[in-house]
Amino acid sequence: MRVTVFLLLLCASAAQARDHWMNPGTMGANALPSFPLEAPWMEDYTLLQVGAAAQWGWRGDASLLPTFRLVTPFGKWAEAIFEGAPFEGWWSSAQTREEWGLTRTEGLAKADIRFGMKVLLADAGENLPKLAFRTITKSTTGKDIESRRFVDGPAYLLEVLLGQRLTSPKGVVVDVCTSLGYWIWQQGDQGQNDAVHFALQLAVRPRGGRLELALETRGYIGWQNNDKPLVMGLRAGVLLTDFFELAATVNVGFQDAPRLEGKLDLKFRLPSLVPLLFPNDPLPSGSK
């Protein structure tokens, strides 16, 4: 009898706490976004990307933030990822202010920094898909949880990437990639929430390779009511020189995500660090 009463009290406490958990669908546009997909293979250059993203929410909320991304490959099999935003400028509509009970209606919030890595698990040749593993950690840098901008806690993405590059006889390059993973975030004293993360992308580069068009669908499905964001986006990139690309992205949110998002990115293709760190020079004479 005592055990039964204890279990009932425990379940009631857990349910009560769960009602106060903050889900992505009831927070800001950049609090817990889904992750854009990338190919499982590594590039032969270091990517330095800077840009800006603007969102328009379902209730008229708006946000703007500068973004950055640094991807450093270490040969064919691994790369390091460092990305995020230093801050976010936000504004909430009257409806959002009333629903959330906000004391502030606009401001600047310290945004999230993320770091991770990608490892190529299987490469069976040009005619077969490549398989990789990607992990990304969201640090606790994001603040202003009182205004529901960011989850002030760590989060982790663990996923597998599968992709294949196809080339037509006319020189058109088509990349087909997909991913499936596990997205976990901590919600302070209220415990942990988790979701299944997924993405699918089709990228096409006409002959010459200077232009790239990519269509992507991504999101995640959690076990709470407002943690099922679904986003579909179109990206266009133009390689202006061998080392510089200009890319623009438009994303449309269908559920628990911003209604509209626009992004503009400057991508710089820098020399790979591997030849600098591990020069492929012959051993000096007499060395063993």
Image (tube, rainbow, N blue to C red):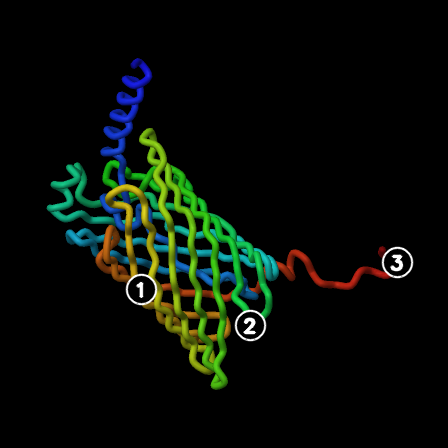
Is residue 102 rendered to the left or right of residue 281?
left
Q: Nearer the viewer, residue 152 or 162?
A: 162
The count of marks equals: 3
Q: CA distance from mark 1 to mark 2?
A: 28 Å
Q: Residues within 10 Å of mark 1 (few under 14, many from 20)?
A: some
Determine the residue positioned at 34% across, 39% down. Answer: 193
**SS under mark 3:** loop
Q: CA distance from mark 3 to mark 1?
A: 58 Å
What label does residue 127 carry, if any?
A: 2
What amino acid type is highlighted by mark number 3?
Gly
Percent across and percent down for residue 67 are 37, 55
Percent across and percent down for residue 218 are 34, 58
Q: Nearer the viewer, residue 161 or 97?
A: 161
Quadrant including the C terminus: bottom right
Residue 187 lies in quadrant = top left
Is residue 73 rendered to the left or right of residue 200?
right
What amino acid type is highlighted by mark number 2?
Asn
Determine the residue positioned at 42% across, 54% down. Answer: 180
Q: Earlier in the sequence, mark 3 or mark 1?
A: 1
Name above or below for residue 278 compared with residue 140.
below
Pointer 3 residue: 286
Determine the residue positioned at 43% across, 70% down. Answer: 245
What label does residue 214 carry, if any?
A: none
Determine the residue positioned at 37% across, 73% down. Answer: 213
Pointer 1 residue: 233
What amino acid type is highlighted by mark number 1?
Gly
